[in-house]
Amino acid sequence: MTAIQLNAEVYRTLGVIAEDEGLLRQALKYLKKLAAKKQDETLMTKEQFFAKLEHAERDIAEGKGKTFTNLDDMHAWLNTL
């Protein structure tokens, strides 16, 4: 079943229970639970972001940073990631 077909089936099924507020509440609770499982792992809190910056600054101070003499070298290195 494709995502479009699944989406349509979800809406059809919600239509069946649309008149029952109790069932809709149960469906919403479960859908929220499912949505919480699918979090974007690339998102971070403000604290995590600043901790990463501090770590990077320490690395640079210790000479662990990466430097480039020109833009082409930087692009070549970035393409390897």
Image (cartoon, rainbow, N blue to C red):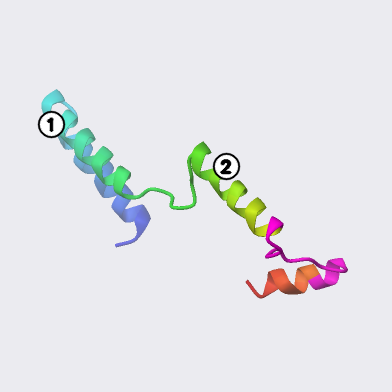
Q: Is residue 67 within the magenta segment?
A: yes
Q: In the rendered view, would you say 10 is above or below 61?
A: above
Of the residues under marks 1 and 2, which one precedes in the sequence?
1
Q: In the rendered view, would you say 21 is above or below 75?
A: above
As rendered, which of 9 and 59 lies closer to the eye? 59
Q: CA distance from mark 1 to mark 2?
A: 43 Å
Which residue is at a point 27% across and 41% down the rendered structure image?
A: 11
Q: Is residue 28 within the magenta segment?
A: no
Per the picture, the main secondary structure of the magenta-coloured stretch is loop
Tell me where residue 71 appears, x and y as whole percent: 85, 66
Badge nearest the viewer, 1 or 2: 2
Residue 23, numbered circle: 1
Q: Is residue 66 left or right of residue 49?
A: right
Residue type, mark 2 in image: Phe
Which residue is at a point 54% across and 45% down the rendered structure image?
A: 51
The residue that label 2 is drawn on is 50
Q: What is the tally of numbered marks visible in this picture?
A: 2
Tell me where residue 14 appears, x and y as whole percent: 21, 37
Label 1 sits on a secondary structure element that is helix
As rendered, which of 8 and 25 lies closer to the eye? 25
Mark 1 surroundings within 10 Å by alpha-carbon count, few (fewer than 14), some (14 through 19), many (20 or more): some
Residue 73 sits in quarter: bottom right
Label 2 sits on a secondary structure element that is helix
- Quadrant for the C terminus in the image: bottom right
Query: Which region is colored magenta?
Result: 61-73
Residue type, mark 1 in image: Leu
Q: In the rendered view, would you say 3 is above or below 51?
A: below
As rendered, which of 31 and 61 lies closer to the eye? 61
Mark 2 surroundings within 10 Å by alpha-carbon count, few (fewer than 14), some (14 through 19), many (20 or more): few
Which residue is at a point 37% across and 53% down the rendered structure image?
A: 4
Residue 72 sits in quarter: bottom right
